[in-house]
Amino acid sequence: MTTIADFTVTTNRGESLDMAEKQGKVLLIVNTASKCGFTPQYDGLEALFQEFKDQEFEVIGFPCNQFGAQEPGDADEIAQFCKVNFGVTFPLMKKIDVNGADASPLYDWMKSEKKGLMGSTSVKWNFTKFLINREGEVVKRYGPQDTPASIAKDIKKLL
């Protein structure tokens, strides 16, 4: 069975991150964008991270420019924007594609594990969220309109 531990991603500093290091944690993985109507969710994501990080919980942001070109910056610009405007301290990864031929293998797996509306596998917009349990399995998928605060109850159940 495939789990989160089977993937390697790249941090926004260009370093490889073996997701096996995250096994045993509850994760909320989000495709993010700095110029989107949902961008204020960074506040809520950071609040979740701060509330639960001592209980082996982590938010991981994957910037993506596939939706309305709303993440045009490079890694440094994105990190700076998130830190200055929203106080983001949770990890940000390298900008990726979440759909199409160049989609991240991690995202291809998560999308196949928890499909969207009407069985769609595509990510429809920025700030789609995937909740991963301590065993590294995708347990739930949330749309962009689902606020971080509304996800807290599901996170608590897994902690």
Image (tube, helix red, strand yellow):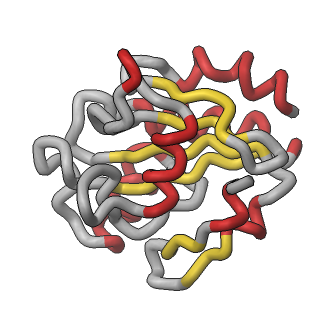
Say which residue appears at 83% left-offset and 22% top-offset: 157
105 vs 69, left or right, is: right
Q: Position of residue 148 (x, y in %)?
A: 55, 25
Does 5 appear above or below 107? below
Q: Position of residue 2 (x, y in %)?
A: 69, 56
Say which residue appears at 34% left-offset and 73% top-offset: 76
Q: Position of residue 69 (x, y in %)?
A: 12, 50
Q: Quadrant of residue 97?
A: bottom left
Q: Nearer the viewer, residue 121 or 66?
A: 121
Q: Quadrant of residue 144?
A: top left
Q: Quadrant of residue 133?
A: top right
Say which residue appears at 57% left-offset and 52% top-offset: 60
60 vs 51, left or right, is: left
Q: Position of residue 108 (x, y in %)?
A: 44, 52
Does 36 appear above or below 90? above
Q: Nearer the viewer, residue 86 or 114?
A: 114
Q: Nearer the viewer, residue 134 or 41?
A: 134
Q: Residue furthest left?
A: 68
Q: Residue furthest bottom?
A: 15
Say which residue appears at 36% left-offset and 16% top-offset: 118
Q: Nearer the viewer, residue 82 or 136?
A: 136
61 vs 150, left or right, is: left
